[in-house]
Image: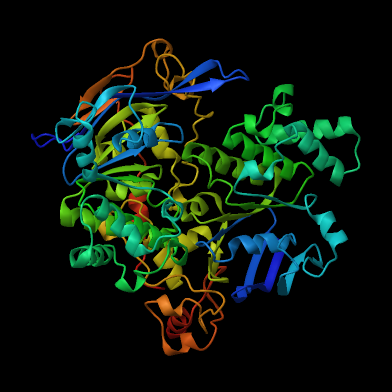
Amino acid sequence: MTDLLEIRELTLEFRSLRGVVKALDGVNLTVREGEILGLVGESGCGKTVTGLSVLGLHSSRQTTTGGEILFEGGDLLTEGDAKLQETRGRKISMVFQDPLASLNPVFRVGEQIIRVIQEHRNVVKSEAEDLTRNALADTGLPTDKSLLRSYPHQLSGGMRQRVCMAMAISCGSRLLIADEPTTALDVTIQAQILRLLLRLRDEHDLAQILITHNVAVAAQACDRVAVMYAGTVVEQGPTTSIMKHPAHPYTIALYQCLPHGKRADELRTIPGTVPDLVAPPTGCRFHPRCDYAMDVCAVTKPMPTVVADAHWATCHYVAARMEDG
Amino acid sequence: MTSNGDTPLLRVEDLTVHFRLRRGISRKSVDVVNAVDDVTLEIHRGQTLALVGESGSGKTTVAETVMQLTKPTSGRILLDGLDLSSVSRRERRESRHKVQMVLQDSYSSLDPRMTVHDLIAEPLRTHGIRGGAELERRIAALLEMVDLGTQHLWRRSHEFSGGQCQRIAIARALALKPEIVVLDEPTSALDVSVQARMLSLLWDLQKKSQLAYLLVAHDLAVVESVADAVAVMYLGRIVEIGSADQVLHRPRHPYSSALLASVPSPDPEDRGRLAVLEGDVPSAINPPAGCRFHPRCPHRMSVCETETPVMREVADGVSRACHLPDDTVFDRFEGDRRARELRQTAPI
């Protein structure tokens, strides 16, 4: 499979009252055609801002960025607004956690989707209506008048998220960035939406970045997973490889915190708290909380070490173990 | 449910809570929301009962009624055998310290203008400890119980992380030495590593002081890690209740089974086994006739559309409300158990 999107050494800093927040520190990610990449991590690790920066949706006045986001031969970071506007919605689209906040409450659902289509494609209204019906059908929604004429508040949470996804795929996007699309939903509805993501991948060849804090969601829906901690990607690889043989101490700790099938007294906890990114730890950002920290970890930023086929981790301990064989 | 013969600490008996909604411009037409119908459950000392279900299943309403924040439409709540609706106001006030509550979002449930010291002192003062060395000693001890040091005493809630706020809320709830604590989604706003710490803290506190928990949660993995007994609710009714081991591993109601199968497993090998229940939860204003689950049930029969199934004991300590044969048991795939085995302990 060829690479569709490549993020290289992405850094992102934004000014705040307390100082410069070093939100992303050299993020490397690739999304291949027709695959789902999971971006997993805890609050504040930078997974959402990574997704936003692909579409230039982070507030540009307050931030400085570095690195490259390569898509179709161009760098999305340096392309102007006009070029970016051509990409947004047409080639790369995004859905968010809270569908009620993403939809306009005063317009009917059908009208909102038709407007998106007319903004991006040169079609007459009747054609746009047909495309809307197709998109709704693709997301498993009814295509009759009553849904098209509903307002967002009249729909259930699961249906609203489907409407957002219909809007996202209506113009033939090749990449969908889904930011916690199931977090606000009940578990039976979450299962429906995960099924839908997989179907869009299989039937429409739609590549996706699935941003989630839930390791189990990533395990069920993603082809590959990138684990983020404090603004860096600490491990990336095929889902099965990462879940069965996690290499980075943070990934392992995260996995051991999962309550699945364990009594509460057997749960592992990670000492300390997530670092303040105004003054992040030097070297490896995880070293103050790491069980395997060595002297070098506080000094040098670790480079990716390949631990298995297409699976790498950024950890000095892992690198040393790999060298020893 | 397991019973050890003595009076349960808390018994909820045939609890029904209906809310009246006024609609229309004249506010004259009235709809009735059947939030909770005929709920019966028991909690014994030192035990955790988890109420699970999706949004709108009535689990929080049950918790609020136990806290005497919502009045039951009918039914009784017995605390240590004492019916709270029939006692005098003074007795009810005195009984309040026995039941305390921790809410989902403690950041918004803690008064931002109060220091940690005042937040924890407030319930103590209300219930008679006016001040002095005794008050200070109790506050320090409570902070230590929830793993927070006394250096935090004079800070306000905005200076704390979500997990720390939740600890303060727990210290506040424990201040009056309650016998039962109602935990309404105590970890759902927390990250998984913070959640793990919270769960082991709650576990330790329970073991130390024989606390009983009424846990309201939607995350079944969390429930599995702390609950002794589980009650599964759907649209205001309990559909299955029994020991956690039975209900979570050998579900006997189609809804319990579907709910369990919708929980994603952390093992990628279970992919494709994610069960999908069609449709949404119907409105509680006009719940479906007969069994309320029948429109979504993969096993529905014609009787389900007309007759409400009664709660019946179908196995040792497990009761269920369903028209299927009594010996029906659904499989739960063992993904979680396998995922646990393959969890590595060291890098590489």
* Residue B184 location, quadrant: top left
Residue B52, horizontal then vertical, whole percent = 36, 38
The one of B95 and B79 positioned closer to us in this rendering: B95
Residue B256, horizontal then vertical, whole percent = 37, 33
State the residue at coordinates (71%, 73%).
A65
Against B167, is B255 above or below?
Answer: above
Against A171, is A86 above or below?
Answer: below
Number of marks: 0
The one of A165 and B325 positioned closer to us in this rendering: A165
Residue B82 shown left or right of residue B327 in the figure: left
Against A263, is A80 above or below?
Answer: below
State the residue at coordinates (65%, 44%).
A101
Residue B96 shown left or right of residue A227 in the figure: left
Viewport quadrant of the C terminus of chain A: bottom left
Residue B200 visible here: no
State the residue at coordinates (66%, 36%).
A139
Residue B197 shown left or right of residue A126 in the figure: left
Viewport quadrant of the N terminus of chain A: bottom right
The one of A241 and B60 positioned closer to us in this rendering: B60
Residue A33 visible here: yes
* Residue B44 location, quadrant: top left
Residue extending furthest left?
B5
Residue A80, horizontal then vertical, whole percent = 85, 65
Residue A38 shown left or right of residue A34 in the figure: left
